[in-house]
Amino acid sequence: MIEDAENAGLLKPGATLVEGTAGNTGLGLALVAGQKGYKLILVIPDKMSREKISNLKAMGARVVLTRSDVAKGHPEYYQDLARTLAEETDGAFFINQFGNPSNPQAHEEVTGPEIWEQMGQDLDAIVLGVGSSGTVTGLSRYFAKVAPDLEIVLADPVGSILAEYINNGVLSDKSSSWLVEGIGEDFLPTISDFTRISKAYAIGDRESMLAGRELLVKEGILAGSSTGTMMAAALKYCREQTEAKKVLTLAADTGNRYLSKMYNDFWMRDQGFIQSQQHGDLRDLIARPFESNDTITVAPDEPLANAYSRMKLYDVSQLPVIEDRNIVGFIDESDILLAVAHSDDCFDKPVSSAMVTELASVDVKDSVDDLMPIFSKDFVAIVKDGGRFLGLITRVDLLNYLRRTTDQQ
């Protein structure tokens, strides 16, 4: 796309590339922009993993986050916002992967021949996801010429409009959100050609994430969330066949960019994708139980520097202070700030000098309603079974619990 724009005289040295992206296009653009000396602005939906965002920033891209809960036509929709930024930026070029004919052309001329050669010209079906639709459109054109009987199958996240369009010919104007990144759409890209797609499978987020994790455990392949969607769809397709077929799907992204999401047990539990043991009491709300050593803690005789470092490392703002497996206090970032603001040896002071000892506790058999008075005082709820410390419940933990409960109804 960039080279075609250069050959057409649309890009000048030092120009700014602008694009809206939720997948690998942004990473590819960052690589090429760095090599060719272009500046790069990427507009990204706010559901993207922090590893992916950090990766793009490290490669020199300016990242603009926008809402992921709005549809095309809304000014904050990532593609519409990217177009606006391109129009408002001097010397900018809007890549427009969803409407750029160079996108499918690259897959027709490069990706398709690569696949056909590497598969020894022996392939019965390909299972693909669709983002911009460049890959599926380009491959459709190529295989229409060299292997017209090859079947192309769509793997689509639940919430996207594409599976219903392929299977039933219904183009819905209503989509819902999904957590899988990089595939699924709420409109038909102008470059799309879905005429050779024979079937589509709608795969939910939970099934996608678990399929991706299973791929790592069983095959040693650390891939991203969209790969989980495609794997799940490919398995469904294969299990429906009555004769042996050679079926190809893609690992489109590395799982290193999703370690804080699909490969993080806490995040997966917060989403309701994996279940911990259910007790029917307040233990079901504790995200990081103390007994399983998941609670991040600090000891009263440790220096404040340790508490501060632990908060940064684990991205938390408060820590229970534990001594002999009993909770003796609590320290948050405000406590540390007040302790170090006017002292030269501030961070060497022990945690006990700054911790709060007035603790708000609930019994494990108390009701969820008993948490609200604690939260109204800006406290964290400390859950105990008699005198035994079980863990913490924060406002976010309660919100996650309520959302999971609502989703199950």
Image (cartoon, rainbow, N blue to C red):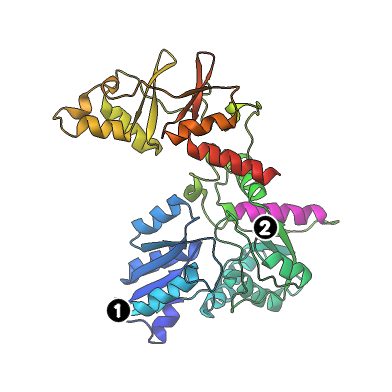
Looking at the rendered structure, the secondary structure element under dot 2 is loop
Which mark's residue is nearer the viewer, 2 or 1? 2
User: Contact (CB < 8 A) between labels 2 and 1?
Assistant: no
Binning the other alpha carbons within 10 Å of mark 2 as few (below 14), some (14 to 19) or many (20 upward) gives many
Q: Is residue 279 left or right of residue 34?
A: right
Q: Name above or below for residue 250 compared with residue 340.
A: below
Residue found farthest to the right:
242
Residue 123 seen in the figure: no
Q: Name above or below for residue 210 compared with residue 163.
A: above
* 232 within the magenta span: yes
Q: Is residue 203 left or right of residue 328?
A: right
Q: Amino acid at mark 1?
A: Pro
Q: Based on the displayed image, in which of its 4 quarters is residue 369 positioned?
A: top right
Residue at which label 1 appears: 13
Q: Based on the displayed image, in which of its 4 quarters is residue 196 positioned?
A: bottom right
Residue 96 seen in the figure: yes
Residue at which label 2 appears: 158
- The residue at the point 42 percent across, 76 percent down is 84
Instruction: Determine which of the numbered discs, if any, sits on residue 73 in the image.
Output: none
Magenta stretch? Answer: 227-240
Counting every numbered tag in the picture gives: 2
- The residue at the point 44 percent across, 71 percent down is 81
Q: Name above or below for residue 149 compared with residue 311.
A: below
Residue 117 coordinates in the image, percent (x, y): 62, 67
Quarter of the image for the C terminus: give it: top right
Residue 213 coordinates in the image, percent (x, y): 60, 43
The secondary structure that most of the magenta stretch takes on is helix
- Residues 387 and 21: in front is 387
* 229 within the magenta span: yes
